[in-house]
Image (tube, rainbow, N blue to C red):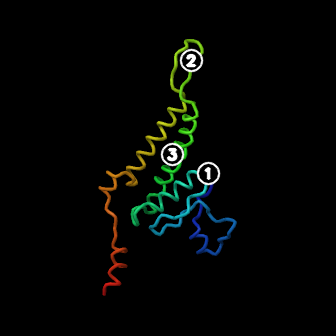
Amino acid sequence: MAGRPRKTDAEKKAKGTLQKCRQNRTQLEIDGRLPEAPPAGLTLEARAAWSMAVSCAPKGLLTALDHGVLERWCRSYAMYRKFAKMVEAGDFEQEHPESGMRSVTPTVSLMIQAHKMMLQCEKELGFTPAARAKVKVDSSEEEDLENAFID
């Protein structure tokens, strides 16, 4: 990176030089929880996947540290769906013009790569049944709410 290192919004605010037009829009507000809103730059289908993942995940499973992996999963999900539609439409086999041999199209290979990336992210995030069995979720907040009414 050429030039001076960028200052964080907190540094600018402390010095009194923070302006709305100069705020770092890509900087995450980290309080330990994953934001409900999807990050900027995701496609419509990837944003829908983000919303689905955040709403369906057990409370406390996803944290701010999972942001990058979840974003990668959402992008892979959107790409997989895009390539799957193309394959379902008939773009799965091609014939070589000189030899006449038939082979799968690059679309199929891309779909398989997106699927592999999704599986890897799902294991890391605890989205598969086997991965969920290994993950412990801190449910102390939920227990505190339930116990508050018992007393």
Q: Is residue 52 above or below residue 60?
A: above
Report helix, strand or loop for mark 1. Answer: loop
Q: Earlier in the sequence, mark 2 or mark 1?
A: 1
Q: Earlier in the sequence, mark 3 or mark 1?
A: 1
Label 3: how many Cα within 10 Å (few below 14, some 14–19, many 20+): many
Q: Could you tell me residue 20's position as x and y percent?
A: 68, 69
Which amino acid type is marked by label 3?
A: Ser
Identify which residue is drawn at 46% across, 52% down.
Answer: 69
Q: Outermost residue, bottom direction? A: 151
Which amino acid type is marked by label 2?
A: His
Report helix, strand or loop for mark 3. Answer: helix
Q: Alpha carbon of mark 3 to alpha carbon of mark 1: how far?
A: 32 Å
Task: Point out the frontmost of discs 3 and 2.
Answer: 2
Label 1: how many Cα within 10 Å (few below 14, some 14–19, many 20+): few
Q: Which residue in the structure is indicated by mark 1?
A: 2
Residue nearest the observer in this picture, 89 or 99: 89
On residue 96, the disc is 2
Q: Alpha carbon of mark 2 to alpha carbon of mark 1: how far?
A: 48 Å
Label 2: how many Cα within 10 Å (few below 14, some 14–19, many 20+): few
- Quadrant into which the C terminus falls: bottom left
Q: Which residue in the structure is indicated by mark 3?
A: 76
- Mark 3–mark 1 CB contact (< 8 Å): no
Q: Is residue 44 above or below residue 82?
A: below
Q: Earlier in the sequence, mark 3 or mark 2?
A: 3
Question: In the image, is 119 to the left or to the right of 143?
Answer: right
- Mark 3–mark 2 CB contact (< 8 Å): no
Q: Could you tell me residue 106's position as x and y percent?
A: 54, 30
Identify which residue is drawn at 55% across, 55% down.
Answer: 48
